[in-house]
Image: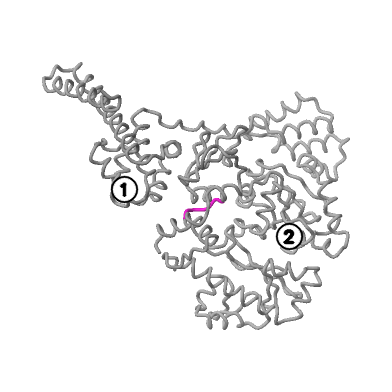
Amino acid sequence: MDVAQAVEAIKARLSLKEVVGRYVALKPAGKGRWKGLCPFHQEKTPSFYVDEDKGLFHCFGCKAGGDLFAFVERMEGLDFRGALERLAEEAGIPLTPLGGHGPRKELLDLLKAAQGYFQENLRAHPEALAYLKGRGLSEESIARFGLGYAPPKGDGILTFLVRKGFSPEEGLKAGVLAEREGRPYDRLRNRITFPIKDALGRIVAFTGRALGEEAPKYLNTPETPLFRKREVLFAYPEAREAMRAKRRALVVEGLFDAIALHQMGFPEAVAVLGSGLSEEQAGLLKKAEVLEVYLAFDADEAGQKAVLQSLDLEMARRFLFFAVRLPAKDPGELLLTPSGPALFQKALEEALPEVEFRFQEATRGLDLSRPEAKRQVLERLAPRMLSPEPFDPVAERLKAVVIGALGLKPKALEDYLQALARRGRKAAPPPAPPKPLPQNRTLLLELDIIALALSVPEERFVETVRFIADRVWPPEGSLLGEFLENARKDPQRDHLRRVLSQKEAGGLLFERLLLAPTLEDPKRKEVLEKTLARLREAYYTERLEEVKALLKETASTDLLKEYQELRAAIEAERRIYRGP
């Protein structure tokens, strides 16, 4: 089974409407059609349509469009291969024969095998299992998050991997082995292991938590072609459905903390793998349609700095942020208390909105009756009050709090901020308006022809392309000419749709595809022939305008003859689509 066959098999097993319906509330909009609010831009009136019969979605507002794979790519931030792998797994379509053997595939297979080794050793070492239960984790949580154990011996997983057919070099590349003086050894010895998964739910790394006093307490496997710690969130695959349903995320520092919150009834919890939220991790939350982010970092100074660091991200402006004041050192401690869930729920309800948290942190330890303290507060908060957006609700609210708390006049604060901006802290220029899509008649007719061709059954596609190529002669550089050439080389409709979607007119194409008639012969052929006549008329008209311009410069007999022939050809085409 090649890629094209896999694509068709996946589409046969998975409903576009059902997949889209996981992200968008859809309502019937005619036979085989549904509509809803577009997930790719903000709108109040639905302009997003799904056509199950054609296997396409399209937004008439932002012009996003495509098939099942294009939708998953956009929603989950994946490339085509990533969307293919995710949907193939869901549909039960094996992808191994698709040329999936390579460095990335080998690393994924090795990490999957290593996970089996760690889980087997957890069952074989009662002391490791007792440690986890002593932290309050249930058997269900241990199994759900795939916790394991790396025994103390230095060559345990090395021997295991070699026995499974993997080389020491591959173990080193995957990060489960380390090297000293040219000799490989087990990296995560005598540690509880946490599998780190990417957005597809594949294991891409491990974190090890020391059972004893070894330093460091937590040890990540190194970054690899599969793993960048700022690009993943621990428990993201397990939390995604709950985050999407609740439109919020609970972000914590520790892996144990995330598991503890899930066990306590907060399944929208995820953990960072560093000191704060990164832009890439914030992007993952956005893909899960999160609107509110509750930062429940440790109560110490480092934890509060991590909160501020997270709030200062560019991506952070897309969320409503709240800082959770924990009633314990971390959420993991609450798991050991019967009232832990109620205490954490109370902390969520009392969480500080971003503005209040920023002001409290800026004024910590300062006497606001002193002018010097007021100046320090202004300096600390000015960067957030200087916003590139014309109306930033956080910036505006922060200004109001500062004015009230520091006894400033509004104009005095604005003068202060403007002075800072003039000294170089200027807001970023507004983004350039989007380039308007081409709307000339010839291009729209070409798109109609392409849409009609792509709408025919697969078995009629090559015949239809040949029919079009025999009846129209697109000028060099035209979209239709490029389509016909690509269709001749690779007559796969899905491939051609993906290629055309990258073009400037890609959004218009999917609009045309959604509107294209689903007619059977001979009506379809009649529609196609009349559209071809209109397109030939458009080509002739464009050439006629060129000839008219040339005739103004020189009275050529040949040009006059061509002018008359073009006029006659235009009238002939009009008779075809208008009728006698």
Labelled disc at residue 487: 1
Would you say the magenta stretch is mainly helix, strand or loop?
A: loop
Kindly report which numbered mark, 1 or 2, lies closer to the viewer in this rendering.
Answer: 1
Depth check: give the residue in front, 272 or 428.
Answer: 272
In front of the other: 44 or 293: 44
Q: Is residue 144 magenta?
A: no
Q: Residue at x 83, y 46 (%)?
A: 349
Depth check, front residue: 212 or 575: 575
Residue 53: image location, x then y, percent:
47, 45
Quarter of the N terminus within the rendering? bottom left
Q: Secondary structure at mark 2?
A: helix
Asked if 520 appears above or below 267 in the picture, the reply is above
In the image, residue 78 lies in the stretch drawn in magenta: yes
* Three-letter residue code for mark 1: Ala
Q: What residue is disc 2 on? A: 258
Q: Determine whether, in the image, residue 127 is placed left or right of residue 521.
A: right
**Point 75% across, 76% down: residue:** 129
- Name the one closer to the observer, 288 or 373: 288
Q: Compared to 201, does 159 lie above or below?
A: below
Which amino acid type is marked by label 2?
Ala
Q: Residue at x 37, y 28 (%)?
A: 440
Distance of label 1 from label 2 (alpha carbons)? 50 Å
Residue 499 at x, y percent in the picture = 39, 47
- The magenta-colored residue range is 76-80
